[in-house]
Structure formats: structure tokens, C-alpha cells
Image (cartoon, rainbow, N blue to C red):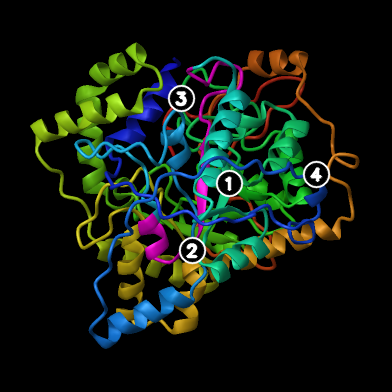
Amino acid sequence: MRTSLSLALLTAATLAACVHPSAPAESPDPFAPPIDEVGPWAAAAPAVVESPPGPATPAPTTPAPTTPEEQRAARLRARAILVDGHSALPSLLLGGSLDRVSPEHELTAAELARIKADGIAGEFFSIRVSAPSSQAASPLGGGASRLALDLIDATHRQIERHRDTLVLARSARDVRRAKREGKVAALIGIEGGHAIENSLPALRSFYRLGVRTMSLTDTTTNDWADSAGGALEPGVVHHRGLSSFGEAVVREMQRIGMLVDVSHASDSTFQDVMKVAKAPVIASSSMHAGGHRRRSVDDYVLRAVAENGGIVMVNSWALFLDEAYAEQSERFTQKYAAHLKALVERSPGDTAALREEIEKLKAQEGPMKAPSLSRLVDHIDHVVKIAGVDHVGLGSSFGELEVLQGGLASNDGLSSVTLELVRRGYSDGDILSMLGGNFVRVLEKAEAYAASTETTLSGDGNPRQLSAAELRELRELPRPPVALPLPEQPLPSPRVLVPPPPSPTSLPRPSKGGAPEPPPPDLMLSR
């Protein structure tokens, strides 16, 4: 198993939430959506094959609201099309099931009944692929596309087993319909453009399987886009943002109606996306963290996403909410990195064993003080202040979460978030927008842009792929890393992202004739 994949698993698992599993009772549901409601490429969608339903377990009970604020929050949750923009569930499902219960270690990733009871109408299942496409990403063999396909199948398998609760959503109309029917719309998003293995035909094939968002990178740079993670890592080929192929990926995603997710992208990659984008973009699991954590979103990015008409979905993972907590976590990870890496290498893909060992080590170290629910809503307040209430959503990183003080423990904490928004004086309309209305609107705009192109999915699609010769040339060309200064002033309208002012740290893109001069030795990472 590759080292970077091991470290990514360690990072996700170290602060993973422990939640109790359950599955609601069976009821028949022919949940394959009608062709006329699933966007411009509906005819290409594969048929749904039903599997035996999972076992039923009792739904959790929720205390009845008593105060006027609690009653108002409950009414809003009942009305809201509540969408969670990021769930780490598929990575934990691969080889497992929502039905596989371990009360002793609490290893399951979600509790469907609790999600449903909290009013979740749309849950994004993240297909996380972080390894470079040039190397094996799956513990079972194969590359990044193989891992993505396995994760997508694990997601489809659970949707089919729990068809009384989950329904595959391929469009905004499917999300609205799931809300009306009292079900949870399962949306699929790829986390890491490595998954397409440098192939636009592969991108379109993932769309056919139900993928509706894709982050261009994950924590590592790929062959056509730079990641904020490891931006100064030696030996990594850097593109100064998007390569020409990366720009083609963005154009093709928007042509077919797949949302471009700028989470994890470097500053230069983000700027290149905004120059190319014709439809709204999203940041599915990012936020302003008051610091320089890799997945935080700086204020100039918030303004630019707002100008683009997109949405920033505030991440609830404690690691990204508080610098002090993050430092504690990093010390823990560094202390036990070698031990945990050895465990991963002995048992590739055994997430249960990894999490069990991490819990033992955490018990030895003692509890880490997690940030409060109020801290999370502080971040929401900040995004509202900078980008506006129409550009805010929720992206919990469900399956990666550490329990927050004050009641936020995975998705069930969204009830507490709603109540806190009520207490802070937001209007009903603003709260409904932030809980999910904004995301549905953005998805509808992406679908409308795709429909306006009046093209067929593959017949008019770009056949571009990176050839072996292009990849050899790319990887042999020396490209020093770059850190771009962040603009201090607001970005001008309309929807034009101006590059940062010239400075010694602003480097030109390398030309085909050679590489640019190396950066000054004192460059600092911009995130």
C-alpha cells in the first residue's frame, strides 16, 4: 500500500466519529428516477438492480422541543431540504456495510435512522481517491479508477439494500422528490480528480454512474492540478495551478452538468478554475478557519465563489475548526505515525483494526478538548459576512468527525446547528437557504448550463486523454513549487478573478521550451 494513502487513512481515522448503527424498516421503492427528471444525459443512466433489503432496527427518539426557539428550529428542519455536502462513508463501507455492527468499538460510519430523524434530505457520499493516478491506489490492486469504481459500487450497494430510506439522486429534482417522500437523496461526489486517470471519457463514465461533483484534487497534486496539500513537497511536479488538460477537465465537467469542487485546491489552481468556469462551483468541505490550515478558505476565495454564484459548505470536522485542537491532533499523529503506518501496511484496507488501535492509543493519551458547537457557527457567521447568506452550506465530513462539545456528533448535530442559527437571529428564509436551499439552487444552475450547451454526453464530448509520452515529458520537466500571495482587497465584479499583485513570489508558468527560474528560498506555504 502506498505511503501517501496510508497517511491519508491515518489522518481521517485519527479523528473519526464513533456513531451507532441502525437501519429502518423495509418498504418497497422503485427508486430508479424517471428519464425526464434526471438531466440532459438521463438516457445513458444504467438500470438499477435491487438487492435484498438490510435488517430493520428501531429509529432513535428525539426529545420533543419545549422552548419557542426549539420549536421554531424543529419546524425549520421539517421544512428544509437539508443537504450535507460531504460524507466519508464510502471509504468506510468498502468491504463493510451499514448493517455490520460492533457495539464495543462503534465502527460503523452512519446511522440511517438518525440521519432521517434529523431531517437530512440529501447526503453526499464522497468517493475519496487521493493517490496519484500513476500508482496503485487500491489495496486490492488496480489504479485510482479501480478504487473509485469500488467505492461507487459500495455506495450503490447500500442504496439498494436500504431502499426504504435511501434513493440515488442524479438531479436537483431527485433531491426535492426525496424530501417530499421522506427519504434521503444519496448524491455521489468524487474527492480527488486522480480518479479519472487523465481521461475525459472516464469522467463521462463516472457521470453515468451518478457522480455529480468532483474535487479536482485531494490532498495530493495530480498530473493536471495542484493541491493545497504538499504544495511545497519536494519531488512533486507542479503546474502553477491547472495545466491545459486541467482546464479541459473543468470545461467538460460543466458541459455535462458535474459540479466543480474547489476543496483541497491550491490558490493558483483555484484562480485558474475561476478564469475558466462558466457555471457555479462549490467548496464541499471547506471553510474559513481563522488560520492557514490546508482545507481552510481565505476571504478572497469566499468573495470569488460568491461572484461566481457558487457555494462554500462549512466543514464540521473539529480538526479544521480550531488551531489548538489541530495541533494536539498533529502531535498525536506524529507520535504514533510509525506504529500506525506499520499496522496499515500489515493489514491494508482494514479500517476496523486501524480505528480500534487508534482508540486504544487515544485512551492512553487522554481526551483532547474539542471545539464547541458555537465555534462551528462562528465559521458560518464569517462566511455569511464575507460571501453572503446565499453562498453558505453545510459539509460535515460525516465519518471523519470528532465529537464536538455542545452536541455536534456527526449528522445528528445538524439539529443543534439549526437551533444555534435561530438563537443568533437569522431569518427563516436565511436558515432554509443555508441548510440546503443554496445547494439545490447551485445544482439547478449547473444543470441549466449543461442543458444550454445542447450537446450529447459523449458524442459531442472532448476525447482528450493524457498520453504516455505527455506524462513522461510532464514528469521529467523540473518545476519548483510556488506560493502565491493572497489578495488583501476585495475582488472586482463581475465574476472576474484578478491575479494577485506582482511580487517576488509570483512565478510564470513554465513554457514548453524550459522551466522558469526557481523561487526565492524563503517562500512560505500560502495555506
Magenta residues? 113-139
- Between residue 444 and residue 32, name the one nearer to us: 32
Label 4: how many residues lie within 10 Å, few (<14), some (14-19) or many (20+)?
Answer: some
The residue at which mark 1 appears reads as 188
User: Marks 3 and 4, Cα distance to the nearest angstrom?
Assistant: 41 Å
Q: Residues within 10 Å of mark 2 (few under 14, many from 20)?
A: many
Badge number at residue 393: 2
Residue position marked by numbered label 3 in the rendering = 233
Q: Nearer the viewer, mark 2 or mark 1?
A: 1
Residue at screen point 26% across, 17% down? 338
Where 502 falls versus 24 (above or below)? above
Between the C-alphas of marks 2 and 3, the distance is: 32 Å
Label 3 sits on what residue type?
Glu
Element at label 1: strand
Task: Classify the position of the C terminus by image quarter.
Answer: top left
Return the x and y of residue 456 as percentages of the image width and height. 88, 47
* Real-space Cα separation, disc 4 to disc 2, in angstroms: 30 Å
Question: Which of label 1 and label 3 is nearer to you?
Answer: 1
Residue at x 73% of width, y 31% of height? 202
Give how far apart the Cα atoms at labels 2 and 1 are: 17 Å
Circle 3 packing at 10 Å, graded few (<14), some (14-19), many (20+), is few
Q: Residues within 10 Å of mark 1 (few under 14, many from 20)?
A: many
Identify the element where label 4 is drawn: helix
* Disc 1 to disc 3, C-alpha distance: 30 Å
Q: What residue type is labelled 2?
A: Gly
Q: Is residue 121 magenta?
A: yes
Q: Name the residue under label 4.
A: 44
Find residue 506 and report its horizontal and vertical position in percent: 57, 39
